[in-house]
Amino acid sequence: MQGETETRKPCLVLGVTGGVAAYKSADLASCLTKAGIDVDVVMTESACEFVTPMTYQTVTGRTVYTSLWKSWQSKPDHIALADRPDLILIAPATANTLAKYARGIADNLLLTTLLATSKPVWVAPAMNPKMWAHPATCENMEILKERGVRVLGPAEGRVACGDTGVGRMVEPGELFDEVRAFLLD
Ligand SMILES: Cc1cc2nc3c(=O)[nH]c(=O)nc-3n(C[C@H](O)[C@H](O)[C@H](O)COP(=O)(O)O)c2cc1C
C-alpha cells in the first residue's frame, strides 16, 4: 500500500550438524522464531539422524533445507542461503563440519553455503573432549578464527558419551542471547 514502508525481519541461517546436541538447537530455533527472527535451518545428512527436519519446520514455520539438489527456485539454495541472512550460526558444529569448512570443502548444502557467503559466521562446536583437543581440530579452529569466524564455546562439563571435559555445546539460552543482541538490539 502507498506510504507504507515494508520492514524486513532479521534473518538467521541456522546450520545443524550431526551431534547429539542437535536436539537443543530445536529449542534455540523455536525461541529465535518467537523473538521475530526468520530462521532458515540447513541440516546435514548426519543431523537428520538425530532430529527430523519436521521438528525444525514445525518450530520455525519455514522450509528446512537438507540437500543441495532439492527445492530451489530462481537461484540455487546455497546462493540464496548465502546472500539472504544477516548471520549464519552453526549449532551444534561437529568436528567434521568444522574441518571441512576450514579447508574449503563444499560437499553438502551447508558447506557450500558457507563457501558462498560474505555474511558473519558463528560456530558453536560440540564434541567429545578428546575430539576437541585433537591437534587437527585445534588447527582447524585457528584457521577459522583467523578468517573472522566467531567461536562460541564449547563449554566444560559432561558430554553425551559420559566423558567429562571441554566439548559441550554452549547452552541454547546463551546462544539465543548472543544472536538476539546481534540481530535485534
Ligand atoms: C551417537 C553419535 C553422536 C555423535 N556426536 C557427535 C558430536 O557431538 N560431535 C561431533 O563432532 N561428532 C559427533 N558424531 C560424529 C558425527 O556424526 C560424524 O562425524 C558425522 O560425519 C558428522 O557429519 P556432519 O558434520 O556432516 O554433520 C556423533 C556420532 C554418533 C553416531
Image (cartoon, rainbow, N blue to C red):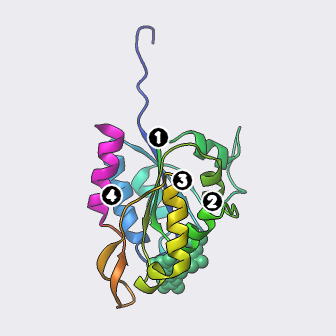
Q: Amino acid under label 3?
A: Arg
Expressed as whole percent of the image width and height from the top left, the position of residue 18 reads: 52, 73
Q: Amino acid under label 4?
A: Leu
Q: Do the numbered discs 1 and 4 sit on residues whose CB atoms are within 8 Å?
A: no
Q: Nearer the viewer, mark 3 or mark 1?
A: 3
First in sequence: mark 1 vs mark 2: 1
Residue found 70% across the figure and 42% down from its top: 73
Q: Secondary structure at mark 1?
A: loop
Q: Which residue occupies the extreme bottom position in the image?
A: 162
Expressed as whole percent of the image width and height from the top left, the position of residue 165 reads: 33, 84
Magenta range = 171-185
- Which secondary structure dominates the residues rendered in magenta? helix
Q: Measured along the vertical axis of the image, is residue 184 above or below residue 53?
A: above
Q: Secondary structure at mark 4?
A: helix
Dot label at residue 147: 3
**Residue at which label 1 appears:** 86
